[in-house]
Image (cartoon, rainbow, N blue to C red):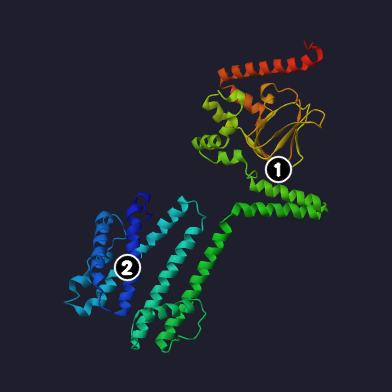
Amino acid sequence: MRIKAEDDYWRVPFLFIVLLVSLETPLRIATGSPPAPWAAIWDILVGVIYLSEFLWHGRFHRGATALALISIPPWELLLGTWLPGWVSLFRWMRLAQTPRLAGIHDVIQRRCDQQMFPAAADRAILSGLVGLLIMHWVACAWIVLNAMEGAQSTVISYVDALYWTVVTMASVGYGDIVPDTSVERVFAVFVILTGMAFYGYLIGNLAALLGSLDAARTRHLEQIEEILSWLRHRHVPERICKDVNDYFHVQWENHVALDDAEMLRRLPPSLQVEVAVCLNRQLLEKVEFLKQAPSELISALAMRLQQKLFRPGDIIFRSGNIGDSMYFISRGTVEIVAADGIDVIARLSDGQFFGEMALLSGGQRSASARATAYSVLAVLEKNCFDKTLEHFPDMKKAIEGTARIRREQSILRSILPVSGDPS
């Protein structure tokens, strides 16, 4: 049964208590020592938590089996004094809830999904947790084998047992602690095989995790390598190969390789608008004739913007071209060059825009635009702009009025230097 997200506030502390019991109880069984003074409080606390879990989920949760019910009362505290020969059994009964630890997988998986971790992250985390638990249990079992030989079980015994467990599971085996009896040798073989299986599984999960950390970047690099291999096979000069390589790396760093329209289409309609507005609203609101535009128009235009990448020296448009797009500089620098191709009229950078007259009039460009660095531009095409305005007739009239005024001003500027009498 998959744990519901709303149950996490109870499930997480409950599973944590089960994990602590699964760590503490085997050590208590292995040492065979009488419970410490704090153990009585701990046993009562565990019993209360187990009982609360049963009352809350026991009727519906398939993990609340009859076997698990026997772990609820603190038997050692209640009957240990009168039935000392049953103390070991009472301690084993406390482990009846251990299978519930399987629920940790659902909790870890959901947390990883919420934090947008790679797909293999939950398996890697779970593998590490299971590995630590297995090593602890094996160390406790080794203490029991030492007790069979009369060795005194102490804290030092646990440290030695844990040390033996780690080197044996890792198949290192320094030889300073070796199995002497047939029982110990059989147990050692079992531990070695368990270690081989565990480390194989762990390494496989870690490899999958590392491979999925940036799968998109890996695919992009593979595409670059494929293109460069083709260019070299066709004996394209190394200088051009380097320019191609630089272009694709800048494209990736600025995420221009991702088609914004395609990415947005993968989202539900409500989120499409929200994401597009978040990305582009500030750019659009800087345009003079859009400052008074309703938010619905801004949102619709934000959905129409497309990202394009230009290399240093690329001509974005030339003087005399028919204006069909307006440009917003997301990152980079652009020069506006006079019709003579020499004089620089303006230098623009991040957050600025140019070519807006194309949206108003669609006439010929009066100047050229040239990228002076790798530049990411958000492009708004005139046909998309016009189609969007059809749904906003009032705004369309206002923009047409602005376009008429701009044209008149442009004509006036072109006439005055010729016919004007300075006086």
> In the image, is residue 367 above or below residue 140?
above
Name the amino acid type tagged 2: Val
Q: Nearer the viewer, mark 2 or mark 1?
A: 1
Residue 200 can be seen in this image: yes
> In the image, is residue 45 above or below residue 290?
below
Q: Residue at x 51, y 56 (%)?
A: 119
- Quadrant for the C terminus in the image: top right
**Residue 124 left/right relative to 17:** right
Q: Are marks 2 and 1 in contact (CB under 8 Å)?
A: no
**Which circle's residue, 2 or 1, is located before the other in the chain?**
2
Q: Residue furthest left?
A: 82
| Residue with the mark numbered 1 | 374
> Of residues 331 and 276, which is closer to you in this image?
331
- Quadrant for the N terminus in the image: bottom left
| Residue with the mark numbered 2 | 21
Q: Residue at x 49, y 62 (%)?
A: 124
**Position in image of residue 297 (x %, y %):** 55, 26
Q: Residues within 10 Å of mark 1 (few under 14, many from 20)?
A: many
**Residue 85 left/right relative to 99:** left
- What count of labels does the image hold? 2
Q: Residue furthest front?
A: 423
**Position in image of residue 104 (x %, y %):** 39, 60
> Of residues 309 and 268, which is closer to you in this image?
309
**Position in image of residue 112 (x %, y %):** 46, 54
Q: Residues within 10 Å of mark 2 (few under 14, many from 20)?
A: some
Mark 1: secondary structure: loop
**Position in image of residue 208 (x %, y %):** 55, 61
Residue 303 can be seen in this image: no
